[in-house]
Image: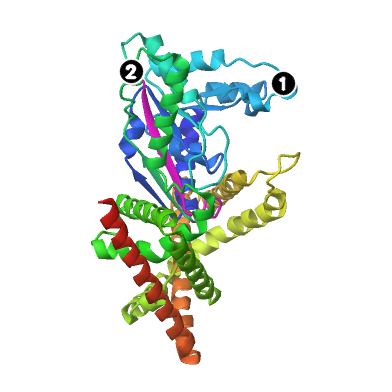
Amino acid sequence: MIYNILKPLVKLSIQGFFKDIHFIGKENLEHEGAILVSNHPSALMDPIVIAAFSKKQLSFIAGAEWFGSGLKDWLFKKYFKMIPVQRPWLVKNGEKVSNKDMFEACYTSLDEGNRIIIYPEASSLTVPWIRELKSGAARIKIGADAHMKGDKVTKVVPIGMNYTNAHRFHSDLLVNIGEPIDFGDILTDQSIDDKERSDRMTEVIRREMKAQVLHIDSEEDVLVVKNVLKLLSDILLKDIGLDYNDAGAVFRVRKDIISSVEYFKAKKTDEMEVLEKRLDHYIKEFESEGFWKFNPFEKASSFVLRTILIMLFGFPIFFIGALMNIIPFAFSKWAFVKYLLIKVSGETKQGAVHPAFAGSFAYALSFVVFLIWYILVSIVASKLYIAWVAIPVTLFVGYQTGRYAIRYVRLFRKLMKVWRWNRLKRKNPSKVKHLLSERAAIIAELMKLRKDYEKATF
């Protein structure tokens, strides 16, 4: 009951928290008797998003240290179907732990057709790659299949959580859900024991998880990959003739860009090093002028005219949205910065907030503040109009106009960037000429390398 009450509220709040959420392969969330394996870049946000957009309730495997005892433990297990797992590396004094109960609970749940989500990286860390995995998911599948004695087969479904920024309000999120994993002959190979079987299966799981994320093999390549993505993603989408709103197409193009950069980093190290420095310098120079993730020189006068008209005719809606949401928004931001953000630390110490929890805590704080705010506003509205219908109307109008207000502000900022670019053209034409010529030269070099990559790999 608690889960069913919270789910629609959480789903609405998540849609408000992110600018856009795209799903690829969403139907793969609904396989019965499945283990969902996902990367874990944003602590509490990762399971919340999957649970909110899944049709049926999920079971979660979570660290036993989160459960505590008494009411909290009962709520987690009873209403949220959470299954505690003991993580040996967190147990004090080197005490031996047993996860027999956890495995048995998983077998029973899967036999009943439920779905269990597990994070085999075993901890949350905001990085754009799949880390080394624990073998728990593979061992659960092996045990569950044995438990069901061939009557059913447990599926393992890989999930990739791809955030543009896992901890920033109104960023984008792509959730990529793959087909159930085919383990080939590993499951039937009688020449290996269960330990080797689970190890091999874990390698396959990691490979399939990598396919669902914009995985970057080397940490030192992260910056150059991000810079190339900024420059080439839109160009390649236009060149190929794909729709930017096609999440799958955008993902494939970006995945291909990452592969090509990593290929040339290995094959033409010196050439890529020079280009990498040149690209980094250009990006910093361009962004220092105030143009970040937006190219004002690509916008025609029709964009300016259309935007101005939207500003004029959409202002009443913006005003209502701002009026109804500015107080909880400002309070949430102030409280997060003052009481949570200052505690974010890479260290594991008392009172510290691990960086992977920053976005989750920002969302949780906003959820509570906005929920209380809208309850109060609804009560006031119902008193003023003496009608219960004022409550849903207030909630609907407040939520929708609030989302519109955010997009209105973003559109206004784009208009200001176009104006700033035109001012720069008038005041410093040589700077503009330099930026555009440098951009064109770098793109030409990258496209040349891309053609070489296509010849070498296809």
Where residue 72 sits in the image (x, y, percent)?
A: 63, 26
282 on left or right of 457: right
- Residue 7 horizontal/vertical position (percent): 46, 36
Residue 111 percent location from the top left of the image:
39, 15
Q: CA distance from mark 1 to mark 2?
A: 36 Å
- Can residue 58 be seen in the rendering of this structure? no
- Vertical arrangement, residue 15 with respect to residue 232, above or below: above
* Mark 2 element type: loop
Instruction: Confirm whether the magenta stretch covers residue 165.
Output: yes
- Neighbour class for label 1 at 10 Å: few (<14), some, many (≥20)? few
- Label annotation for residue 153: 2
* Count of picture labels: 2
Task: Classify mark 2: residues with Cα within 10 Å, few (<14), some (14-19) or many (20+).
Answer: some
Q: Nearer the viewer, residue 367 or 172?
A: 172
Q: Is residue 348 visible?
A: yes
Q: Residue furthest top?
A: 149
* Residue situated in front as seen by the camera: 320 or 27: 27
The image's mark for residue 94 is 1
Q: Is residue 273 magenta?
A: no
Is residue 266 found left or right of 454 in the rendered image? right
Coordinates of residue 224 in the picture (x, y in percent): 48, 60
Upstream in the sequence, badge 1 or badge 2?
Answer: 1
Tell us which disc is closer to us: 1 or 2.
Answer: 1
Q: Which residues are magenta?
A: 154-170
**In the rendering, which numbered label is found on residue 394?**
none
What type is the residue that disc 2 sits on? Val
Secondary structure type for disc 1: helix
Q: Which amino acid type is marked by label 1?
A: Gly
Mark 1 touches mark 2? (CB < 8 Å): no
Colour theme: rainbow
User: Which residue appears at 41% of the width and 25% of the height?
Assistant: 201
